[in-house]
Image (spheres, rainbow, N blue to C red):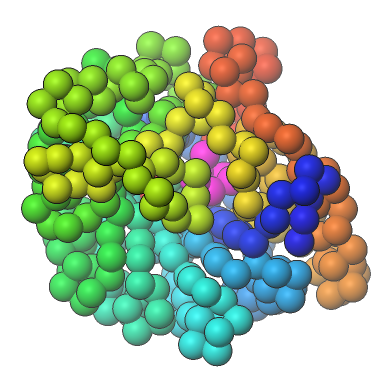
Amino acid sequence: MRDGFGRTIDYLRISVTDRCNFRCHYCMPEQQRFLPRRELLDYSEIALIAERFMDHGVRRIRLTGGEPLVRRDIGVLIAHLGKYVTSGRLEELTLTTNGSLLADHAQMLAKANVHRINVSLDSLDSDRFASISRGGRLKEVLAGISAAKAVGIAIRINMVALRDINQMDLLPVAQYCAENDFDLALIETMPLGEGVSGRQNDYIALDEFVSPLREIAKFIPLAHRTSGPARYWQVEPLGLRLGMITPLSQNFCDNCNRLRLTTDGKIFLCLGSNLNVDLRQAIREGGVGEVDRLLETALRLKPERHDFENQLNDSTSRLSRHMNATGG
Ligand code: SAM
Ligand code: SF4
């Protein structure tokens, strides 16, 4: 698949639920309303849409949310999609999780051909962790990460950079990752969703966020890429591979290769835009042919780039969708 700007689209992120057992304050407000269950795609609908995408050239799928592991019987969907890795139709099936339920699911993931996961971890201080996630228990997340490591799943830790909130956590998190052989990806906080407090105050460009680490370590640029937008450095003498995701300070839309399927069956063409097509209606009323037709439309509509820089400072142009609704 190629979009209107000639970019190859081979990566699909599927949000399997908008629900979550955390309320990270950069992601959603404390009192969040979730979609009624009847509006969610069921597993057979998700699988069918995933197949249509694979037939159109999608080679990698990431499951996300909300928290994907809170959806009931999620193992059924993961096992089903994992079979496409065995058959070679998919190159890779991955997952982004807050890690809190990982201890119970690690074996299932490994069996289903999930060889690589991203786990969010914004602090190694249990009080700060609980405060940022509004109630998350650090101990459970660390136990989940250890369980995934024990079954051989490669792990990248995702840490959202928050001014005056977790900059002091960077070195401990970096050391923890290096010791355990995990990659670390830092993410600039994006202006998504209404009712999310402290937006402008919390934003910090990654260059500034990592400056204390640069004073004590050497950053060597790497050619390494995954399917996502991170650019990587080797940080020595820590022995850490560090990724930086800079949607605001350094735009990466030229190489965008992905589409997002929301929990209620919409294809969002860009995290920073409300443009979407409704595959749930297509699948329930028009069948497979209609889904294919809408996929073609989606490719034509994909915008050239997002505009988070202006949305950060101008609340009138900010998107009301929260990150958990579209899937990070
Ligand atoms: N619940 C899972 C988790 O936290 O990993 C998966 C969904 S979460 C929406 C996916 C990623 O998006 C997480 O790494 C999270 O830190 C990040 N995220 C959420 N809201 C964000 C925001 N406003 N700006 C930047 N990253 C955000
Ligand atoms: Fe939940 Fe992930 Fe959003 Fe945190 S970032 S509230 S864990 S969906």
Taking the image as shown, residue 3 lies to the left or right of residue 176, namely: right
The answer to whether 53 is drawn above or below residue 244 in the figure is below
User: Who is closer to the viewer here, 21 or 14?
Assistant: 14
Report if residue 24 is visible in the image: no
Query: Residue 48 appears in which quarter of the rendering?
Result: bottom right
The image position of residue 179, as x and y in percent, is 9, 53
Instruction: Please tell me which residue is depicted at 44% across the width and 55% down the height of the picture.
Output: 226
Residue 312 falls within the magenta-colored stretch: no
Q: Is residue 301 above or below residue 58?
A: above
Q: Whole-percent x and y of residue 174?
A: 17, 40
Q: Is residue 311 above or below residue 224?
A: above
Q: Tell me the quarter of the image containing the N terminus.
A: bottom right
Front-lying residue, 233 or 66? 233
Q: Residue at x 68, y 32 (%)?
A: 305
Ligand 1 resides in the quarter of the picture at top left
- Residue 316 lies left or right of residue 74; in this view the side is right
- Residue 91 vs 323, above or below: the answer is below
Which stretch is magenta?
Answer: 323-328
Q: Nearer the viewer, residue 74 or 124?
A: 124
Depth check, front residue: 293 or 25: 293
Q: Residue at x 60, y 81 (%)?
A: 89
